[in-house]
Amino acid sequence: MILVIVILIFGYLVLDSIKKFITLNKISFKLKGPTPLPIVGNLIQIGDKGHKVLLKYHEKYGDVYRIWMGDYFTIVVRDIDMIKKMYIDNAYVFLNHSDTPSNQYFSHNFGGLPFNLDKSEWKKRRVITAGALSKVKLRNVYNSMNSIIGQLLENLKQHSISGEPFEPHYHSDKLLSDINFKLFFNSDPDRNDVKSKEFQKFSDAVNQIVVDLGTGKLSDFVYMLQPLLLKYYQWTYKHMNFIDKFIEREYNEHVETFKPEYNEDPRDFLDTLIVKMGEHYEGDDIKKMVLELLFNIFIASIDTTAGTIEWAYLYLANYPDIQEEVYQELKTVIGDRELLPSDRNSTPLLNAFIKELNRIKPVVPFNIPRLTTDDVEIDGIFIPKNTHIIANTYGVGYCEKYFPNPSEFNPSRFLNPHINYSVFSYGPRGCVGQHFAMDILFLSIGNIIKSYKVSKPNGTKISEEGKLGLSFRPFDFTVSIEERK
């Protein structure tokens, strides 16, 4: 009897999937794409190398095509004009991000900023967050950033002295973790005390969430399985609770020690957020909004920016001539003084190196998929409500019409760019912290090049293949460094 029921349920799901595939494929008949399987859609074909598979589909089906992510009808786009028409010209139709159980759970039930589904509430929080992340408000953090990067350079010196190859992964993650602790909590996690140990536990919990979020789950995309995944998180997951309590303690401590002068000269991002939130919310709502936003931004920033810095080590080692050109620019423009964010206008080669790095190895290769809230037609293509949209940043970067010889690492292509290309997405839901992220990349990568020569161990080229998780990062590798004289 049980076997019969299982067979009937499975048969129903298969037939339902086929019916759905046929119906929606007819609605968007102009779009071609791979043949989906019942229930799972195209998830099996995509596998764990989605960046390469989706790129091959572009070669076969064009700049815009359709796939099925389980039960989700999905359109993949690598045409910049089309992406802008979606995310800028029709912003409010494409404003929401996908509503999977993982996104729901790790955003505190679609709270915070990235996954908030209430458009008016999202807009308010966006304005608050952007204001809190301004350079004027964060001048104390900017003043400390070079000292934090200086600590990284000091740690790297040990590898230079020993001459032993090392893995950049740890140093990249620690740098971002240290900057974030200074940004959010005005704290130095290198202190050898109880609070520092709590910071380490916090970092470990964040890293575990990054790993878990980066692990693809079939139950995120199959409607029937979604309630089970959500319950699994709620019943078994402990890291969220620890992180929430940690941030709440920091929040309470900031409120208790807050002084009037911090309104104009905040200690950190948390001070600014408390003040800004107080202008729009009251009582416990302030704490709730602050906790959700801090969690969102911490998770989003630490893996992505650290990943780009890790890729920088790899490409500096593999392309010594380019590294030397950037070094000579820094030597000429900066000399022995401290590198500052304001130097960006005088360092076109370093800027081009970072932009080319973001193009060839975008750490968020598909951005965060969007979910349409209405039917819309763009360039003759009908896009139904509740369609998932993947703006394929990786695909754009490897598109010949924008970047000839896209597999070649060539920073000079960005010395006179002919297109408005951004890895931070477009429109009102683009990355709110992109200027801060770019300043971190500029200062950290620039100082590494200025202070050390990065090379391949034994002269063997390092693999430039990457692995997909929450972000796109290189496989484990080692480099050697030599202090510049």
Image: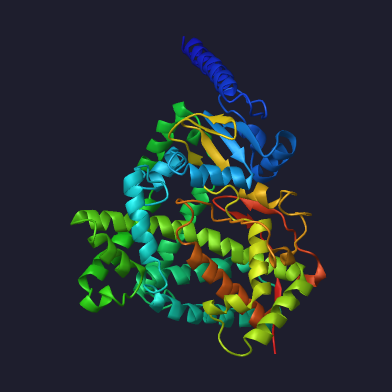
Q: Position of residue 71 (x, y in %)?
A: 52, 28
User: Colour scheme used in the picture?
Assistant: rainbow
Q: Position of residue 460 (x, y in %)?
A: 81, 66
User: Farthest residue in the right direction?
Assistant: 459
Image quarter hosting the C terminus:
bottom right
Using the rendered image of the protein, determine whether residue 243 is visible from the camera's viewpoint: no
Residue at screen point 48% across, 36% down = 220
**Count of numbered circles in the view:** 0
Instruction: Please tell me which residue lies in front, 357 or 485.
Output: 357
Residue at screen point 59% across, 42% down = 82
Classify 23 as above or below 389: above
Q: Position of residue 298 (x, y in %)?
A: 43, 60
| Residue 25, quarter of the rendered image | top right
Classify 60 as above or below 108: above
Instruction: Please tell me which residue lies in front, 197 or 383.
Output: 383
Instruction: Please tell me which residue lies in front, 177 or 167.
Output: 177
Q: Position of residue 468 (x, y in %)?
A: 61, 49
Horizontal side of residue 478 vs 220, given as left or right = right
Classify 409 as above or below 397: below
Horizontal side of residue 400 vs 148, given as left or right = right
Classify 441 as above or below 33: below
